[in-house]
Each structure stands twice: as C-alpha cells, then as structure tokens.
Image: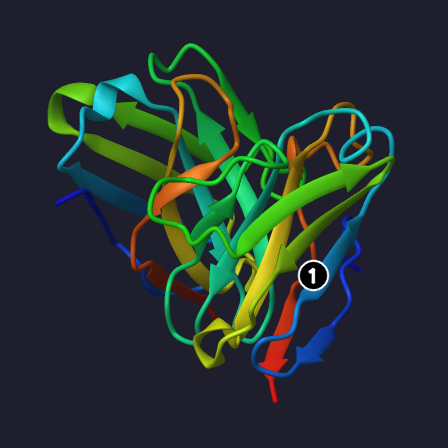
Amino acid sequence: QSALTQPASVSGSPGQSITISCTGTSRDVGGYNYVSWYQQYPGKAPQLLIYDVTKRPSGVSSRFSGSKSGNTASLTISGLQAEDQADYYCSSYCNSCPSSSSLLFGGGTKLTVL
Amino acid sequence: EVQLVESGGGLVQPGRSLRLSCVASGFTFQHYAMHWVRQAPGKGLEWVSSITWSSGSTSYAGSVQGRFIISRDNAKNSLYLQMSSLRAEDTALYYCAKDKVGGFGFAFDVWGPGTMVTVSS
C-alpha cells in the first residue's frame, strides 16, 4: 500500500477534462507545497509535469494543471488527447514520516483515453 | 543535450553488494541535488535516496537505510549508489534523477533511462 493514495485508473474521451487525486496527510501533502506530478509511458522514464503543487516546467502543455486542497492534491488534464494515455504519479515531501522516507510517491493512476 | 545515464546494474545474489553509477551531461551537475528512484517490475515508483549539491546532506528511504549509501563526485559529473546486503525486494529498475534545485526540492526534472538490478540466487 502506497503512502499517497491515487485512484488506480481513470478514463475520459478526447476533448474532455479529467482529474486525478492524490491524498496524503498533514505530514506530507497537506503540510508542504512540495507536490509533484509525473507522466510515465510504458517502458520509459517518468517526466515531470507539475512541481510545487501548481508550477509547470517549460515545455509542458498548459493543458496540465495542479492544485491542492487540504491533504489532497489534484492533477487536471483538459482537452484530453490520445497521447495523454499513460501512467501518472504524484509525489510529496514528507516530514517525520513513519516510514522514515523524506519523499513519498502515490501508487500511480492509469489514464485511458477512450 | 541534458542527459543522465545509469550503469552498474545486473544479477546479484541475496546478501551481496552492487554499485550503481550515473553520469550527467549537458548541465552544471555540481549545482543540483540528485536522487535515486526505483521501480519494481510492474509496480509504481519508490524514492530511494537523495544528496544535495555539495554532499552536505543525504537522505534515505527507511527500506534501504543502513544498507545503501549515496555519494557524488562533482569533478566527474557522477552520482553513485553503493548497495549492500541486497534482498529480493530490492529487485527493480533504478533511475537517477536531477532535482530542479541544489537542495531538496524533490522535483525531478531530468531522469535517466534506468539500470536494472535483479537480486536472486
């Protein structure tokens, strides 16, 4: 069981918007703005989509956006495209985590574009 | 081109040691914190260890604390992970990743292709 909780799968049709949630605790997601999101295609290394909750690295499409409310962070993909079909992972800094880990990942969400 | 390339993976028996390397190019390596992240076959990402730009601070996941040691050589643009007392559950693809900042920002903006470590007798 991952420390950050993500839905195992989400789906949407081209052009729609989808949101992937990432739920933690006040020790991680809720307590700090060090939440990142990554996209991973099968057999490839992850790519950074969002960092510090809402910031987008240069080169990342504006269709990707991040937000946070309480202990839950969210990734929203608008104008869904076939190329968005991939696995998505959230991560967060964690202070005084029971696992002694400074960084936690979510279990990952598989996005299917219908 | 900004690039990270890992090496040193392979098949190793339980209890033995292995040293992973990661060579960086295309950016000023000494300015950034670096990390190791692993992914077991068919599973999600797991953070392993981190080191600041100056090696002044390191951090480890509880699952590898006391068994793995992260280090870097800024003169050689290289990051290392010395792994000892390896267990079957350490079997994974190990990624080297660059932080966006010199300290622990924990935003990994460059990743290598990974090197596979298989622990089995």
Front-most of residues B15 and B79:
B79
User: Is B67 left or right of A34, judged from the image as shown?
Assistant: left
Using the image, determine if residue B18 lies above or below residue A102.
Answer: below
Side (left or right) of A85 relative to A1:
left
Q: Give the labeled residue for mark 1.
A: A107
Count the numbered circles shown: 1
Q: Position of residue B76 (x, y in %)?
A: 12, 27
Which residue is depicted at the point 22% across and 26% down?
A: B29
Q: Is residue A20 left or right of residue B5?
A: right
Q: Secondary structure at mark 1?
A: loop
Residue name at image x 64 percent, y 74 percent: A16
Q: Which residue lies at the image location 28% right of the left edge and 34% below the top edge?
A: B79
Q: Nearer the viewer, residue B21 or A63?
A: A63
Location of residue A88 with respect to A83 vertically, above or below: above
The structure residue drawn at horizontal position 63% and vertical position 36%, both measured from the top left corner, is A53
Q: Identify the chain of the residue marked 1, using the numbered disc in the image.
A: A
Look at the image and tell me whether residue B14 can be seen: no
- From the top left corner, tell me how far across and down residue A50 is, in percent: 53, 44
From what the image shows, is residue A62 above or below residue B44?
A: above
Location of residue B101 (image quadrant): top left
Question: How many other residues sit within 10 Å of disc 1, few (<14), some (14-19) or many (≥20)?
Answer: many
Q: Amino acid at mark 1?
A: Gly
